[in-house]
Amino acid sequence: MSKGTGSDPRVVVVTGASSGIGQAASRMFAARGCRVALVARRRERLDRLRDELVAAGGEALALQADLTAEDETDAVLPKVVETWGRLDVLVNNAGYGVQQRFEDMPPEAVARMFRLNVLSAMALSRAALGPMRASGGGSIVNVASVGGVVAHPLNVAYCASKHALVGFSKSLRLECLGTGVRVTAVCPGSTRTEFFDVAKRDIPFDGMIERWSVPPEKVARAIVRAADGNRALVFPTWSAWFLFFADRWLSPLSQRGNVRYRDRVLARTAGPGDAPSPKS
């Protein structure tokens, strides 16, 4: 994992590196001897993580960027290639979601979510193809979600964005077969990160979501393995496997479970004069 095509260490770019899954994956890549470019909005956190990795004997580069801004996204990979001369692994991990009724979600909020969750990953992947081929090959790992292969109520825009990311990953993988560039979508279930602190600001999650959550390190290990593999989809958590299986093979049961979840959650936020939640 640590070496590229020659004697140089692999160069890895991780977006959303300042916390959660991205932070854990960055540490794991660095521990394997990779040079790691850390990309996120929060400069102070990036600098702390870079200093931590360097103090442990690694090589790291902190790149502050708002990936919803096209010019900042376009500047990321040229800086990495200019610094280290190559690119071997791109982990598109940056993303966010909100639990909210779709009708209450402003159009600009939907557009911003797609800019980060989908369009930034597509732009970075496009920019990565040339440097990867020049390095003899590489791996693009897109961190999607089980919500990218199954549907969830109250997460309409998020699921749509992750479905788009999974479709992009699978299609780009086929386009790149035989070129030395591999593409994988990693689809975790509930993970204990700051993602849920943001996502539940409008409507809280049911307690079972937290009970099913796994540490970010579990997903990060799957990302590191995916960078060496050639699978189209990876489900790193048992909850993701269960939801995928239920949606595919037990569709009526999956639908009933989703509707019950919707009604339980909405009941917790309903005011005294609100109409009861719709039933199916």
Image: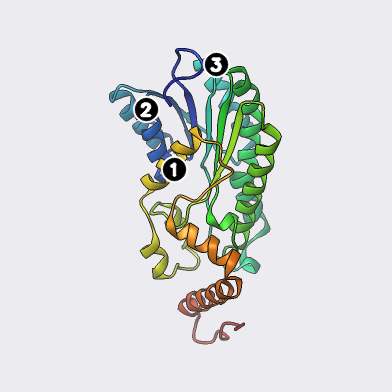
Question: In this rendering, is residue 149 above or below 42?
Answer: below
Query: Would you say the residues marked 3 and 1 are in contact, meaning their CB atoms lie under 8 Å apart?
Result: no
Could you tell me residue 212's position as x and y percent?
Answer: 39, 62
Q: Give the mark, 3 or 2, whose residue is nearer the N terminus.
A: 2
Q: Is residue 241 visible?
A: yes
- The residue wearing badge 2 is 32
Q: Is residue 153 visible?
A: no
The three-letter code of the residue at mark 3 reads Glu
- The residue wearing badge 3 is 82
Question: In this rendering, is residue 212 above or below 141?
Answer: below
Q: Between marks 1 and 2, how big is the CA–CA gap?
A: 14 Å
Query: Where on the picture, by quarter, is residue 208?
Result: bottom left
The three-letter code of the residue at mark 2 reads Arg
* Disc 1 secondary structure class: helix
Question: In this rendering, is residue 209 above or below 234?
Answer: below
Q: Give the mark, 1 or 2, whose residue is nearer the N terminus.
A: 2
- The residue wearing badge 1 is 222
Could you tell me residue 252's position as x and y percent?
Answer: 60, 75
- Residue plotted at (62% across, 48% down): 166
Query: Would you say the residues marked 3 and 2 are in contact, meaning their CB atoms lie under 8 Å apart?
Result: no
Q: Left or right? Give the position of 153 relative to 30.
A: right
* Disc 2 secondary structure class: loop
Question: In this rendering, is residue 34 above or below 69?
Answer: above
Could you tell me residue 184's position as x and y percent?
Answer: 57, 40
The three-letter code of the residue at mark 1 reads Ala
Q: Residues within 10 Å of mark 1 (few under 14, many from 20)?
A: some
Q: Residues within 10 Å of mark 2 (few under 14, many from 20)?
A: some
- Residue plotted at (60% across, 83% down): 278
Q: Between marks 3 and 1, how big is the CA–CA gap?
A: 29 Å
Could you tell me residue 249's position as x and y percent?
Answer: 59, 67
* Disc 3 secondary structure class: helix
Q: Give the mark, 3 or 1, whose residue is nearer the N terminus.
A: 3
